[in-house]
Image (cartoon, helix red, strand yellow):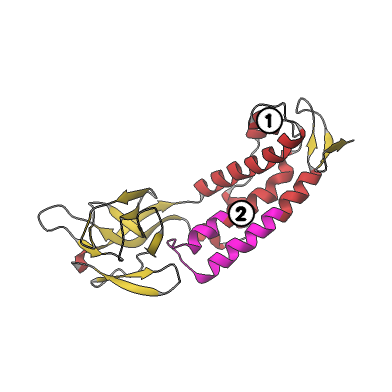
Amino acid sequence: MAWNDTTLSTLETIARWEKEVNRLAGTTEHWGLLGISGDTPYTLTVPTSTASVVYTNSAGTEIASTAITAGVWTIPVASIVSLVFKATGGAVLGTSALNEGRGASVAVVYPDNTTGTLTLSNGSAWSRIGINRTWDEKLTLARITLDSDIATELFKRFPDYQTDTEVLDLITNPDTFLLACDLKALELIYFDLGNGGISFNQNHAEKSRNYANRYQRELSSAMSRMRLSSDGTGTGNRYWQEGMIVG
């Protein structure tokens, strides 16, 4: 079976490790900001030196806005579920998961983990926003990362191959990388949550680091279990990272 035809991580396989991950995703509602059009749009004060506000809309798309005048951001006509405030050059000045849903202020977390509030021009900017978020994109990104890590190692032994697909198709037991792919997906999910995601929790950043370390160990073990064949068929031979293939 070709490498790209093999299904590794799914929402079900990652749930075997962390039951909460699928509860933290899916179709749900979240407090957010909903801009309006007209002569008096809603605005928000922003941290000093903010050059752009990157907001995530209800579809999960990140959009950069530079509608900032004298430290005040004009909230666009969009359903907004999180904010990142960036300086010129891209440095993050603060983030907001928009969890309050009331009043004329917005909570912000600064890079040093201190917190503060930003002022809304009108508390009516708050709205319950329907979102449809799953971890499918994280599963895809985990697979891409795993592909790259394996191909990088294989190219050291097989430099004549031209593409990642060609060298990955040498693998005859691709399912041996299932656990590694699960661990990478969980690392990415908790990294997202630990950096101002919708269901922010202080433990998420620590979980991300834990799964990152476990991924590296499992990847090394899977590489030693991997078997290769010149045409990607049959049982193949074991691969040794020292640069030898043995039967």
What number is the disc on residue 2? 1
Secondary structure found at label 2: helix
Main SS of the magenta segment? helix
Say whether residue 189 is magenta.
yes
What amino acid type should be assigned to the residue bearing mark 2?
Ile
Residue 120 seen in render: yes
Residue 179: x percent and y percent?
69, 51
Q: Which residue is mark 2?
A: 14
Q: Nearer the viewer, residue 125 or 73?
A: 73
Q: What residue is rendered at 20% in x and 65% in y?
A: 124
Picture coordinates of residue 141 (x, y %)? 55, 45
Residue 11 within the segment the image draws in magenta:
no
- In the rendered view, does 134 fall on the left or right side of 219? left
Name the front one of labels 1 and 2: 1
Instruction: Report the span colored magenta.
Output: 188-216
| The image quarter in which residue 165 lies | top right
Instruction: Report which quarter residue 88 is drawn in.
Output: bottom left
Mark 1: amino acid: Ala
Can you tell which quarter of the image residue 14 is in?
bottom right
In this orientation, does residue 1 appear?
no
